[in-house]
Image (tube, rainbow, N blue to C red):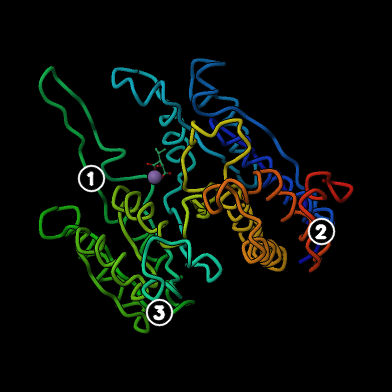
Amino acid sequence: MGVLRKRIALLSGDGIGPEVCREAVKVLEAVSERFGHQFIFDAQLMGACAIDATGNPLPEETLEACFDADAILLGAIGDPKYDNNPAASVRPEQGLLRLRKSLGLFANIRPVTAYETLLELSPLKNAHIAGTDVIFFRELTGGIYFGEKGRNADSAYDNCTYSRHEISRIAHLAFQSAGNRRRKLTLVDKANVLETSRLWREVVQEIALHYPDVTVDYLFVDNAAMQLILNPKQFDVILTENMFGDILSDEASVIAGSLGLLPSASIGESAALFEPIHGSYPQAKGKNIANPIATILSAAMMLEHFGLHREAELVKEAVDFALEKKILTLDLRPSTLAYSTDQVGTFIAYYVLERSETLPHKSNIEAGLSTII
Ligand code: IPM
Ligand code: MN
């Protein structure tokens, strides 16, 4: 792959979003410096910060910038002042949901790996989780998130609807992924109760005929929630609808060791967005303690999407090296030994730039070690 020029809409969002995005940008700049690519960042408002500035969680200008971009990098959105006010008519999340829908980002891809170097930190039995390598394909623009909703004084409803088309387009992506991995796909649903789940099963059974080398399993979501903790190694690709995927992927983060480690890609026909799966973690805002790795790995998924495989591999290698050397934030290390958000980002960016096996001293990481850092 030659030298690329890419336009990236940067939606840092709320809470720790700006801090973790800053580190991912630092790493992307290290990639561009090392390989000669040009990444042009276009910073835009979305979420609570956009409501504060414009009254709209997804301003028109932001949406346009996203349409114009080759990819979108998102930090996190959300603010407790809305979470604790069920009567709020405008909410930060509406911005994200509208963005996903407007750009047609129907497939949310969330890989979960148990890092060898972090096993000892997991509350789960190490022998159960060692070697886990699961990838979620979560449907992202349908289901109960987007169905008709409403309320009266004493009742409320959220409809869940899925069409064959919505199911089959993500199912094909999930089967293709399984074909390139360990060739096992698990559909998670609630087909013993929900009509939509029965349609998912029907469509997936039909599509499975086109992928004879992929073994298909069907699990009810309650059982899947348990199996994920009991024996996560049984899973390869998990395909599921919007809400189940939201819940199960947070649960699966315990296997990786921290929610702060999990990246995601949201893919549509033409647009692509990359974001950590964690939220805006308002308690940590501005404290320089949040884990930037989920966002940095989301940037690696973006590089992969651009076809920059070598570059993506190098970023992942840099993250592995940081984990191995215990250059970790507070979620993964006790406070006396923890590194700050920007130290972790700087360390990873430095490795990307220099691929240096020598471990810079903590104070050197603080001082900054290269021209870009
Ligand atoms: C996620 C988040 C969002 C979701 C929220 C912020 C709307 O939890 O990306 O998983 O539920 O999809
Ligand atoms: Mn979620």
Query: Measuring 78% from the left and 44% from the top, which residue is drawn there?
Result: 366
Above or below, 349 relative to 142 = below
Residue 271 visible in the picture: no
In the image, ligand 2 is in what quadrant? top left
Foreground of the two, 164 or 72? 72
Res. 353 mark: 2
**First along the sequence among labels 3 and 2:** 3
Residue that carries the numbered disc 3 in the rendered image: 183
Dividing the picture into quadrants, the one containing residue 234 is bottom left
- Crowding at dot 1, Cα within 10 Å, few <14 / some 14-19 / many 20+, comes out as some
Q: Position of residue 340 (x, y in %)?
A: 66, 44
In terms of secondary structure, where does tag 2 sit?
Answer: helix
Question: Is 132 left, or right, of 115 in this rendering?
Answer: left
- Crowding at dot 2, Cα within 10 Å, few <14 / some 14-19 / many 20+, comes out as many
Foreground of the two, 340 or 90? 340
Residue that carries the numbered disc 1 in the rendered image: 161
In terms of secondary structure, where does tag 3 sit?
Answer: loop
- Crowding at dot 3, Cα within 10 Å, few <14 / some 14-19 / many 20+, comes out as some
Above or below, 282 relative to 39 = above
Query: Measuring 64% from the left and 39% from the top, which residue is drawn there?
Result: 9
